[in-house]
Image (tube, grey):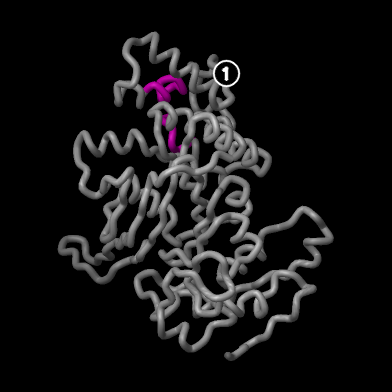
Amino acid sequence: MTMPGEVLLSVEGLEVHFPVTRGIVFERKVGLIKAVDGVDFVLRRGETLGLVGESGCGKSTVGRAILRLVAPTAGRILFEGQEVGGLEGASLRALRRRVQLIFQDPYASLNPRMSVGEAIAEPIHLHRLRQGKTAVQDRVRELLQLVGLSSSHAGRFPHEFSGGQRQRIGIARALACEPDLLVCDEPVSALDVSIQAQIVNLLQDLQERLGLSYLFIAHGLNVIKHISHRVAVMYMGQIVETGEKNALYSSPAHPYTRALLSAVPVPDPAVERARRRIILEGDVPSPMDPPPGCRFAGRCPIALDACRRETPVLAMREGADHPLACFRSADAARLMPLMRSDPAPVQGDAP
């Protein structure tokens, strides 16, 4: 992996709240869905930040807010030091050329009535990146070869390709804009496991060759582990733990991260038998009415009364070498072991 450079993207206190209304003729607001509720992170040039969490935790909303596809309620998004929230017209179009989105469903992201060549050429024409028909066609062929497809595929239509090939086409279309940052919104979750590995390897190769930065969104830690430099774990609109990949995987300190890691299968049968699966009980709270204190406290097996009253902030904590939002970081490994050879977990442990 390339070594990350200077800060490319900075997200500070990002909130995205969606109003909930009732009524057809006379709508009235009855509440807010707090999809993203105070998110901070930075992304450097040449770096991949993995954003992981359960479905509905706000990961995709963060990605769409960066592209201004949804309007932030509060906070700041800075791209190369320029605030995204104030961009309009030509400035906003320039941002969207440099920050591109790769979708989860590669077929839905392509117009079935356009050939592959036309789909890839569209952003080239839109942003006037090449002049003349021949130059555009040459660029389309170059992009197809760059993502591992044949230039002869330009005349075919999306339904003639497999899922993995369609995702390669989607990547080629994003690269046609010559971006600096790709927001990858679960780009491999709809693909077979073997194809997932091919797409992840392709993205890593493109990063090395083109110096790209990735915000890689996923709901599983297994894919994130292979592609990311750093990982941020989200729960109910907030980042609960973040750190360098190896540090977070080797010593997860937040109970939610430990539960997620316990669900990742290991190919070694002996190691898999020795692992302890952490089963979380209870339901995820409603984003319209989040509980006071830590939002994970109602499902956390080691939560204290203080966890239900006070909200932990993302910071360096005792027993951890990376930031997390948890009052029990020093006790998580002892009370929520990931291996059966570790001491047995203590139920209802009190300080």
* Figure check: 16 above or below 153: below
- In this figure, which residue is indicated by the disc labeled 1? 150
Residue 319, percent across and down?
A: 59, 74
Residue at 58 percent of width and 51 percent of height: 224
Residue 165 visible:
yes
Relative to residue 153, is residue 198 drawn left or right? Answer: right
Question: In this picture, which residue range is highlighted in magenta?
Answer: 107-121
Task: Give above or below for 110 relative to 322.
Answer: above
Dominant secondary structure of the residues highlighted in magenta in the image = loop
Residue 25 or 62: which is nearer the viewer? 62
SS under mark 1: loop
In the figure, residue 91 lies in which quadrant?
Answer: top left
| 219 in the magenta segment | no
Q: Quadrant of the N terminus?
A: top right
- Disc 1: CA contacts within 10 A as few (<14), some (14-19) or many (>=20): few
Residue 119 sits inside the magenta stretch: yes
Instruction: Evaluate whether residue 103 shows in this view.
Output: no
Tell me residue 49's x, y (percent).
49, 50
Residue 231 in the image: x percent, y percent? Answer: 53, 55
State which quarter of the image contains the C terminus. bottom right
Q: Residue at x 42, y 44 (%)?
A: 6
Work out whether residue 343 or residue 296 is closer to the camera in this orientation and state it: 343
Residue at x 44%, y 74% (from the top left corner): 285
Report the front residue among 194 and 65: 65
Task: Give the image location of residue 350, x and y in percent.
Answer: 59, 91
Q: Give amino acid for label 1.
A: Ser
Which residue lies most toward the left here?
Answer: 26
